[in-house]
Image (spheres, rainbow, N blue to C red):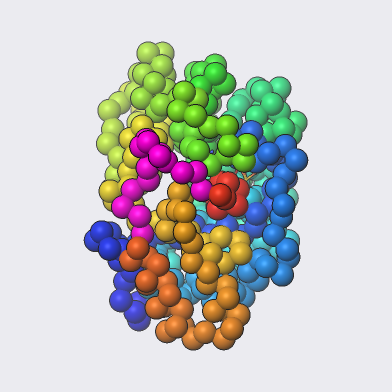
């Protein structure tokens, strides 16, 4: 690392970068995007592969060790595996991971593994076809499960994580099937608490099915061993008491983990966001396209990171939902 590592003004070292490679998506998940989609970014407003690679190399120089590629749906970006290969070639990164809805994994898993992607999160909200359709507005469960199975045929891709957003009134009947899925397959299933980043702006606290409620419901049927959240991790991962599989809980609403957050985000249009819930963002695309040097960009990044939010305020009165939805931020 040639440059001093990134720190924020609260003493946290920043080592993880989430990059949204597109705001577009082939699904319309209820908790993320409106049914009609969103006004997409103009194509020339989206960072090119070269621009993403240049920024990522600079971030790696600034101590970023892990990168996660997300969106929108990253696999709908044309030639996405080529971008993945450009990023895994950057010196200094320990890991480049991908979060996907799985729809295009049958087509792309091999190319992504060959490009050096060693970690995958696949989002699956229901194991029943009609309920999956209701949640994602796409009748795609069989295809997603085929994609997941195809991915699992590559030993390099393991361990594979399967993420489900937990919503009260929907997810309760999925808990035991998902627990059994995690016990029968080499997947770590993780439940994510529903956050106010939905396209319809209809989130409210009563819809949050908490990780603790889910843990207790699963534990009553398939006992789980106790577990703590590892430092900087988002998930608390409980192995089943008999050693067969594990379930993770990502509880940003009921048990915020801001205190040791090491994450920043780059949107598809080149805005740096220092929190999922940031109300401000920092434009890196304009200086990048105006010919800024790495030293110039470093200064802009360092200043933005220094102002990283202490914590999110989802649980506080007066909380303001950011204008961008999860799909436009890069979850
Ligand atoms: N399209 C890809 C996918 O669905 O995996 C990547 C982008 S998606 C925005 C990343 C993750 O954010 C997914 O696991 C999705 O379920 C989650 N997500 C989206 N909206 C959310 C919300 N309002 N609350 C919690 N998680 C959300
Ligand atoms: Fe698309 Fe992922 Fe959002 Fe679903 S969660 S609409 S798959 S970006």
Q: Is residue 78 visible?
A: yes
Image point (37%, 71%), residue name:
303
Which residue is nearer to you in this view: 170 or 235? 170
Left or right side of 242 for 114: right
The correct choice, above or below, for 13 with respect to 89 in the image is: above
Image point (47%, 59%), residue name:
280
Instruction: Give the magenta-colored segment's residue range.
Output: 308-322
Which residue is nearer to you in this view: 61 or 107? 61
Q: How many marks?
A: 0
Query: Is 146 included in the stretch rendered in magenta?
Result: no
Q: Which residue reaches farthest front?
A: 318
Q: Is residue 182 visible?
A: no
Looking at the rendering, the quadrant in which ligand 2 lies is: top right
Left or right side of 136 for 189: left
Image point (35%, 55%), residue name:
309
Q: Position of residue 148 (x, y in %)?
A: 62, 40
Left or right side of 230 for 37: right
Image point (35%, 63%), residue name:
307
- Residue 215, quarter of picture: top left
Magenta span dominant secondary structure: loop
Q: Position of residue 304 (x, y in %)?
A: 40, 67
- Residue 262, quarter of picture: bottom left
Q: Quadrant of the N terminus?
A: bottom left
The correct choice, above or below, for 223 with respect to 19 in the image is: above
Q: Position of residue 324 (x, y in %)?
A: 57, 50
Q: Position of residue 153 (x, y in %)?
A: 60, 44
């Amino acid at each position: 690392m040639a440059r001093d590592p990134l720190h924020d003004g609260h003493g946290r070292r920043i080592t993880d970068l989430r990059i949204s490679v597109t705001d577009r998506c082939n699904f319309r998940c209820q908790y993320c995007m409106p049914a009609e989609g969103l006004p997409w970014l103009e194509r020339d407003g989206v960072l090119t592969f070269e621009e993403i690679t240049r920024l990522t190399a600079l971030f790696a120089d600034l101590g970023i060790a892990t990168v996660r590629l997300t969106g929108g749906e990253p696999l709908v970006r044309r030639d996405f595996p080529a971008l993945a290969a450009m990023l895994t070639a950057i010196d200094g990164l320990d890991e480049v991971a991908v979060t996907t809805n799985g729809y295009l994994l049958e087509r792309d898993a091999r190319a992504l593994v060959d490009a050096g992607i060693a970690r995958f999160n696949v989002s699956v909200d229901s194991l029943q076809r009609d309920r999956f359709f209701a949640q994602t507005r796409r009748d795609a469960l069989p295809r997603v499960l085929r994609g997941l199975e195809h991915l699992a045929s590559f030993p390099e891709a393991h361990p594979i994580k399967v993420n489900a957003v937990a919503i009260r009134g929907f997810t309760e009947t999925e808990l035991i099937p998902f627990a059994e899925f995690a016990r029968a397959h080499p997947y770590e299933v993780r439940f994510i608490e529903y956050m106010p980043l939905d396209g319809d702006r209809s989130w409210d606290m009563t819809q949050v099915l908490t990780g603790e409620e889910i843990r207790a419901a699963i534990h009553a049927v398939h006992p789980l061993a106790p577990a703590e959240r590892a430092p900087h991790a988002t998930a608390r991962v409980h192995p089943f008491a008999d050693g067969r599989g594990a379930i993770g809980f990502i509880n940003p609403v009921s048990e915020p983990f801001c205190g040791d957050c090491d994450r920043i985000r780059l949107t598809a249009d080149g805005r740096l966001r220092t929190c999922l819930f940031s109300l401000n963002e920092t434009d890196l695309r304009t200086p990048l396209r105006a010919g800024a040097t790495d030293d110039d960009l470093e200064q802009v990044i360092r200043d933005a990171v220094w102002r990283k939010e202490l914590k999110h305020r989802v649980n506080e009165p007066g909380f303001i939902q950011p204008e961008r939805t999860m799909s436009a931020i890069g979850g």
